[in-house]
Amino acid sequence: MAVVVLTVDQRGSRSGTDRVPEILAGLATVPLLRPLERTAGDEFQGVLDEPASLAPIVEALLRQDAWKIGIGVGDVELPLADTTRAGRGEAFLHARDAVTAARNSPWHLRVAGDDPGTRALETTLWLWAAVLARRTKGGWEVADLVDEGLSYEEAGRRLGISQSAVSQRAQAAGIVETRRARELVTRLTADLLEREPT
C-alpha cells in the first residue's frame, strides 16, 4: 500500500519557541490516514493517502519558514499501526532520509522514494516555495480572503482598499501560480500513489 509520510522537524528549536502544538492545531482538519502527531522533541509525523491533502500541509509549513520538511513516498507495513509513530515500512524510511537531507536543501524540503516521479514532485514544491517566499503580509491577507471564496471586490471592501490594489497584491503574491501549484502537487501525488485526485 503506497502512502505519503511526512516527517517534519522545527528549525532552530533550541533557541525558539515550540511551534509544534500551533501547527498541529492549524492542520487538524486536513484529511489524513494517520493524524499528524509529535514523535520526539520538536518533530512530528503524519501519514496520508489522499493526494489533495499534501498541498495544504506543505503550504502551511512553508508559510511559517520554520521547518525541515521530509516527504517519503512508498509502501507501509500492513496492517497500518494505530498511531503514526508506530508505523513501519519504506515510506517511513524515505521520510526520515528526506528530513535529514532537508537540512541543507532548497527551502529545507526534500521528497524521497523509489519512484522517479518523486523528483518531479520535489521540483514542483521547490518552485512553489520560491513563489510563496516573496509573498508579503499584504499578499497573504489577499490570498487568505480569496481562499475563503471572496472576490477581489469583496476582499477590497474587507481590507479597505480598491479592487485595483487587491489585483496588484494578488499578482505580486502569485495567487494564480499558487492555484496551479496546488493542482499540480495533487496530480503528481496522485500519480505516485496511483490514485485519482479528488
Image: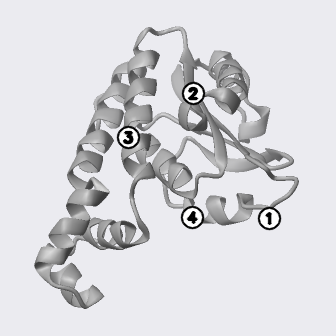
Residue drawn at x 44%, y 33% as measured from the top left: 126
Q: Determine whether the residue tagged by mark 2 lies in a helix, strand or loop.
A: strand
Residue 128, labelled with which disc?
3
Give, as a three-letter code, the residue at label 3: Trp
Residue pictured at 20% horizontal, 74% vertical: 166
Question: Is residue 151 at all visible to an observer of this figure?
Answer: no
Q: How many C-alpha atoms fall within 10 Å of the one at disc 1: few (<14), some, or many (≥20)? A: few
Q: Nearer the viewer, residue 155 or 198?
A: 155
Tell me the number on the disc at residue 4: none
**Which comes sooner in the sequence, label 3 or label 2?**
2
Q: Judge left or right: residue 25 versus residue 164.
A: right
- Which of marks 1 and 3 precedes in the sequence? 1
The residue that label 2 is drawn on is: 110
Name the residue carrying label 4.
26
Give the residue type that dot 1 points to: Thr
Pick the front one: 5 or 119: 119
Which residue is the site of mark 1?
Answer: 17
